[in-house]
Image (cartoon, rainbow, N blue to C red):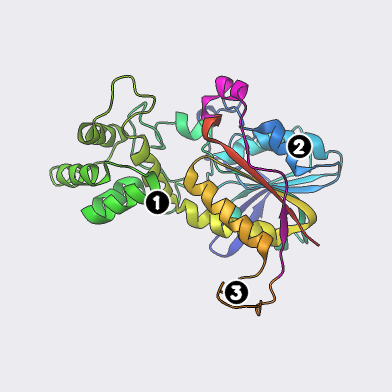
Amino acid sequence: MIMQLVGNRITVSRGVPNDQRSERIGIGGSDGHVPVLLAEAVDALGLAPGTTVADGTFGGGGHARAILEQIQPGGRLIAFDRDGAAAQRAAAVATAFPEMLTFVHASYTALRETLDVLSIASVDGVLLDLGLSSFQLADSERGFAFSADGPLDMRFDQSAGEPASELIARIGEQELTELLWRYGDERNARRIARAVTRARSTAPIETTGQLAKIVSQAAGGRRGAPTHPATRTFQALRIAVNDELGELERGLFAAVESLAPGGRLVVIAFHSLEDRLVKQFLAQEVRGCVCPPELPVCVCGRQPRVKLIGRAERATPSEVARNPRARSATMRVAERLP
C-alpha cells in the first residue's frame, strides 16, 4: 500500500508511482547500500512475530527488510520517507512480504496521523535512522554530495520546499555565517559566507561543483585531510533546507505518542546536533516533570513516559571498516512506560 500526505490529508493507492525510474533508484541492481547498526537496531526493537512497527526513514530498505523478517507472520510495518524515489524500493521489498508493508510518502512526523487513518491505536516499535541513504548520495541530480557536479538541490522531498541554490541566493552574509556555524560547526563560517556572497554577486551558484570550489578556495584544507573542505558546509545547508532538527524534535514526540506500553524507540543519529537533541529529549521524557528548577515541588504533574534501555551504542571497528559511513553513528534506545 502506498500512502501520500498532501497538506493535512493522507491519500492511499495500491499501485506504485509511475514517474519513478527504477534504474535511477537502484531497483534490480547492486546499489551498495549498507544499513548502519542493522543487527543492533533490530535487536534493540525487541521484535516478535505479529507486532506492528514504524520505520521513520525507509531509505534503501535495509532496516525495513530485516524488521519484516522478524515480525512475520502477521506483522505490519509502516515505513515513511520524504523522498518519493523510495516508493518503488518499498514496492520491491513488499513483494517478498505480501500485505505486511505500508509505505507513506511523508515525514515521520506524520506518524500519529497516519496511524489514525489506518485505524491503528499504537505501534510496538519505532526506528528512526537519520542518515542519508546511499541512493541520495550517489545521485548527482539530488545535490547532496560533491563527488560529481549536479544541481544544488539537497531537498529530501523534491516536490516541496526551497532548494539549497535558492536558499544561498536570498539569505544575507551574516545569516549564512550563523547557519554554517550552527548546523555545520564550521570554523571558517564567516570566510565562506563572505566568499559565497561575493561569488553570487557575479553569477548564481546553482551546482554542487560551483559551491564546493568556492568553499574550498575560501576555507583551504590540508593535503591528505580525511574530509573535503566543503563537507561541513554541505551538511549545514542540507539540515537547513530540510529543517532536519525541527523534523527530529516533532518526530520524537510523535514516536513516543504512538508507542504502546513496552514498545521501543530506537534512534540512530549521525552527527552531534542530532544526537544531542535525541539525548536531551529522552532525558526530559525520563524525568517527566517540566517545572522550573527553582520550584521546591512539582506542580505540573507530568509523569515520565519512557525509560532508557542501555547506553548509547556505536558501530564496532569491524563495521566501520566495512562501511565508513558508520563511523559517526550513535544509537539510543528507550522503552515506553505504561
Calculate the distance from the C-alpha at mark 2 to the C-alpha at mark 3. 35 Å
Residue at 72 percent of width and 62 percent of height: 305
Residue 118, percent from left and from top: 74, 58
| Precedes in sequence: disc 2 or disc 3 | 2
Q: Please identify the quadrant where the C terminus is shown.
A: bottom right
Three-letter residue code for mark 2: Asp
Within 10 Å of the Cα at label 3, are there few (<14), some (14-19), or many (20+) other Cα atoms? some
| Precedes in sequence: disc 2 or disc 1 | 2
Q: State the extent of the magenta-drawn residues as a range.
A: 303-325
Instruction: Kindly identify which numbered label has been placed on residue 240.
Output: 1
**Tally of marks:** 3
Calculate the distance from the C-alpha at mark 2 to the C-alpha at mark 1. 33 Å
Residue at 73 percent of width and 33 percent of height: 66
Residue 129, percent from left and from top: 60, 42
Q: Secondary structure at mark 3?
A: loop
* Residue 233 visible in the snapshot: yes
